[in-house]
Image (spheres, rainbow, N blue to C red):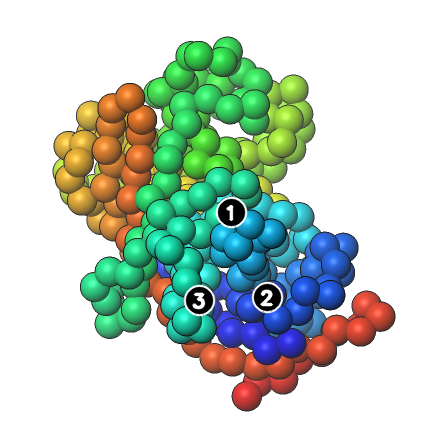
């Protein structure tokens, strides 16, 4: 299978046009992801991205974590999938589907000299992923005592679940402890959750770090950057409707949050293709070579 090693804001992926490999089963893709994403014996990446076409003709993204589990959404990954679809000449009609939801996508001006794309992400204030508050309520800047008695979290669903907390200074050790602690709190997070800290550095810039569900501490997470940007708008830390810069250890994106009856945050960032190769997978055996 031909693949592209790519990244969005330092979040690196293995990208495959899976429309060409329809005979590969979901179980095989899961095993392939575990082997290919391994940084010691595989290609090494934060996840596997598959460009797919659904039965109704809509193109979309399947994203698999390094542990072989499926993720509902990946903000950095979907931009890379959008670029591949555009280069392949596929008529996406400005939409890509991920996790059963359709997302509006578009090509924007280059960012940091690289091709860039946008994705409009609808934000929900509650989902079944959150068992620590009731449907119809919202959880903005509140404490989750069982997780951390001092921090104030905002819970948001962007297709995948996030909790984000504002801190004076990010501690990766503290963040890792909370990310691991979530696994013990099934009664609160039945499907796990992505945990992020963010620093407000100005009225138009924040810095984010994330412990990703199924991946651990990563350099970058697009939906976490979007969730953090949404949280600062909900808390009035930035002006809603204004484009802000969101940085992390991997790079940067730009976010614009529209508040109202529906909350939508536009995520804009690079979709960088680094190198290409060929992977071979047969009877569970994996190998690859660069081209």
Residue 90, numbered label: 3
Residue annotated with mark 2: 19
- In the image, taking residue 206 as reference, residue 222 lies left or right, namely right
- In the image, taking residue 22 as reference, residue 137 lies left or right, namely left
**Residue drawn at point x = 42 percent, y = 12 percent:** 137
Does residue 199 appear in this view?
no
Where disc 1 sits, the SS reads strand
* Vertical side of 118 occupied by 90: above or below: below
Q: CA distance from mark 3 to mark 1?
A: 17 Å
Does residue 1 appear in this view?
yes
* Vertical side of 145 occupied by 31: above or below: below
Residue annotated with mark 1: 98
Q: Earlier in the sequence, mark 2 or mark 3?
A: 2
The 10 Å Cα crowd at callout 1, few under 14, some 14 to 19, many 20 or more, is many
Cβ atoms at labels 2 and 3 below 8 Å apart: yes
**Residue drawn at point x = 75 percent, y = 73 percent:** 281
Q: Nearer the viewer, mark 2 or mark 1?
A: 2
Residue 202, numbered label: none
Residue 166 in the image, given as x and y percentages of width and height: 33, 31
């Amino acid at each position: 299978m031909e693949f592209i090693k790519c990244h969005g804001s330092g979040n690196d992926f293995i990208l495959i046009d899976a429309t060409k490999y329809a005979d590969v089963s979901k179980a095989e893709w899961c095993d392939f992801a575990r082997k290919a994403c391994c940084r010691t014996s595989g290609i090494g990446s934060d996840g596997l991205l598959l460009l797919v076409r659904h039965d109704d003709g809509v193109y979309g993204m399947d994203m698999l974590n390094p542990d072989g589990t499926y993720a509902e959404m990946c903000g950095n990954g979907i931009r890379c999938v959008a670029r591949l679809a555009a280069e392949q000449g596929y008529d996406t009609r400005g939409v890509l589907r991920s996790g059963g939801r359709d997302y509006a996508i578009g090509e924007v001006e280059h960012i940091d000299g690289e091709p860039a794309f946008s994705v409009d992400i609808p934000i929900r204030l509650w989902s079944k992923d959150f068992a620590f508050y009731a449907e119809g309520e919202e959880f903005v800047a509140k404490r989750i005592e069982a997780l951390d008695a001092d921090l104030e979290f905002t819970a948001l669903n962007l297709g995948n679940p996030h909790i984000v907390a504002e801190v004076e200074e990010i501690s990766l050790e503290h963040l890792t402890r909370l990310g691991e602690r979530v696994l013990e709190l099934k009664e609160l997070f039945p499907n796990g959750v992505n945990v992020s800290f963010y620093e407000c550095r100005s009225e138009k810039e924040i810095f984010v770090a994330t412990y990703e569900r199924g991946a651990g501490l990563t350099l970058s997470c697009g939906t976490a950057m979007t969730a953090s940007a949404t949280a600062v708008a909900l808390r009035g830390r930035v002006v809603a409707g204004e484009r802000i810069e969101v940085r992390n250890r991997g790079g940067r994106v730009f976010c614009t949050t529209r508040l109202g009856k529906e909350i939508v945050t536009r995520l804009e960032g690079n979709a960088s293709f680094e190198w290409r190769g060929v992977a071979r997978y047969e009877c569970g055996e994996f190998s690859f070579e660069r081209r």
